[in-house]
Image (cartoon, rainbow, N blue to C red):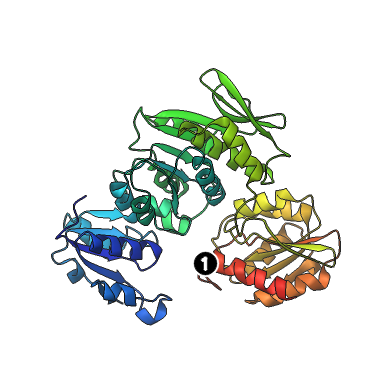
Amino acid sequence: MELADKKILVIGAGISGFAAAKIAKKFGADVTLSDAKAEADLKFDFQNLRDAGINLVFGKQTEDLLDGVDMVILSPAVPVRIPLIQAALAKNIPVISEVELAYDLARSPICAVTGTNGKTTTVTLLGLLLETAYERVGVGGNIGVALSEVALEVGAGGCIAAEISSYQMEATHNFRPHVSAILNVTPDHLKRHGTMDAYQAAKEKIFAQETADDFLVLNYDDERTREIKARAKCKVYYFSRKKILDEGAYLDGDVLKISCGGKIYNLCTVDELGIKGGHNVENALASSMMAFLAGAQAEKISCVLKSFTGVEHRIEFVREIDGVKYYNDSKATNTDSAIKALETFAGNIILIAGGDDKLTDLTDFLALVNERVDWLILVGDAAARFKADAIKNNFPADKILDAGYSMQKAVELAKSVAHPPQIVLLSPACASFDMYDNFEERGKNFKEIVNAL
């Protein structure tokens, strides 16, 4: 991609937008960064962008922003459907995502992971697994580090582990990882994509440009992902914790294995695996299969699987108080992810849930709440709907507590009713934007409050 002397418009201030603007400027482009919010409403320091000579435009985005523009680069939070982007497309101005920019800059192969749940754990583990085979490994994308920055840092001769969201795939055209994976597809982000089919179509763009020289890893146990194989032009391998596979990564009894090229490699047992829970067995199988296809040796994969203990905000142990353990699962921003957290514990759960409501169906989630939760403490915009549906699903009304918009109150309520062998679990099943900027901020606030008790 030639950026020198081009006029580039970056839409959306944030991690990806900042990176795209600075990189385009570094390569000699005339860069404007625009965000629909007022500068005062954005919690960023823009001075280094101003110092770099990047033009900044805040507030209402009108079509004159497109005057003379050679290319538009989108932050993932910005939908392609907004009028400004539709106007750019109508003028035949190329519109790409920051992920596409990263791919064009990359000089090392990319191993890319998407899916509704499990992405961050899988990609973090994948990065560690790739380090056993490559001197230079970068981890970026939807995990909090812009993929374009990682691509430049790694350069040639390394490998890149990328977490890719459906948002990031909307404006990609040529993005071609060498190894990709789709972990699962369950209801999420329907406000943005509209339908499950549109949501899945965005996910499937991750392998759309792959050829017979590339690999796609799919979840055999997920019906939506299993049938994707029919649409792939690359080599496809499955992972499964329910079926022994002729080729792929699978659970055989309590042993994680890889079968490939007529050989079977034993990795570790479920008890030896550093991350716990059935969903993490799946994450480990997926990342192991990807790393193996990217060149990692099974023996070294095994060592990493035993030592890796997980990521922040995903069923993260915080503290034990008076015999009660507190867990931070703020990354559970949808019901499917919260279900996986509830499945990790046998019962006796005091659950803190709620937040920015995605309006997904609660039936399966509440069935497990009925089975394993002793007290349900609700916060945020979703509290009223969650409470009404919980009562409809026969959860006792006198075991539901409303903490309003206060995490402090939620934790204090949990502590007031908690007794061993109960555990306190923050697993919201909702986004965080009604109370926080992101799930990380929510999780950190929860941990601060628990640690201050």
Of residue 191 and residue 322, the one placed in the foreground of this image is: 322
Quadrant position of residue 389: bottom right
The structure residue drawn at horizontal position 62% and vertical position 38%, both measured from the top left corner, is: 303
Which picture quadrant has residue 22? bottom left
Q: Left of 210 or right of it: where is 87?
A: left
Query: Which residue is painted at 43% across and 51% down in the image?
Result: 166
Query: Does 226 sit above or below residue 18?
Result: above
x, y percentage for residue 417? Answer: 82, 70
Q: Is residue 226 left or right of residue 322?
A: left
Camera-side residue of 365 and 123: 123
Q: How many marks?
A: 1
Figure check: 121 above or below 29: above
> How far from the left and from the top, in percent, is residue 236?
46, 29
Against 63, is 393 above or below? above
Residue 394's quadrant in the figure? bottom right
Q: Residues within 10 Å of mark 1 (few under 14, many from 20)?
A: some
**Residue position marked by numbered label 1 in the rendering:** 438
Percent coordinates x, y for residue 385 in the rendering:
63, 66
Three-letter amino acid code at the position of disc 1: Asn
The structure residue drawn at horizontal position 28% and vertical position 76%, both measured from the top left corner, is 50
Expressed as whole percent of the image width and height from the top left, the position of residue 19 reads: 34, 62
Q: Is residue 275 visible?
A: yes
- Find numbered disc 1 in the image and state the secondary structure of the residue it sits on: loop
Observer-nearest of 408 and 148: 148
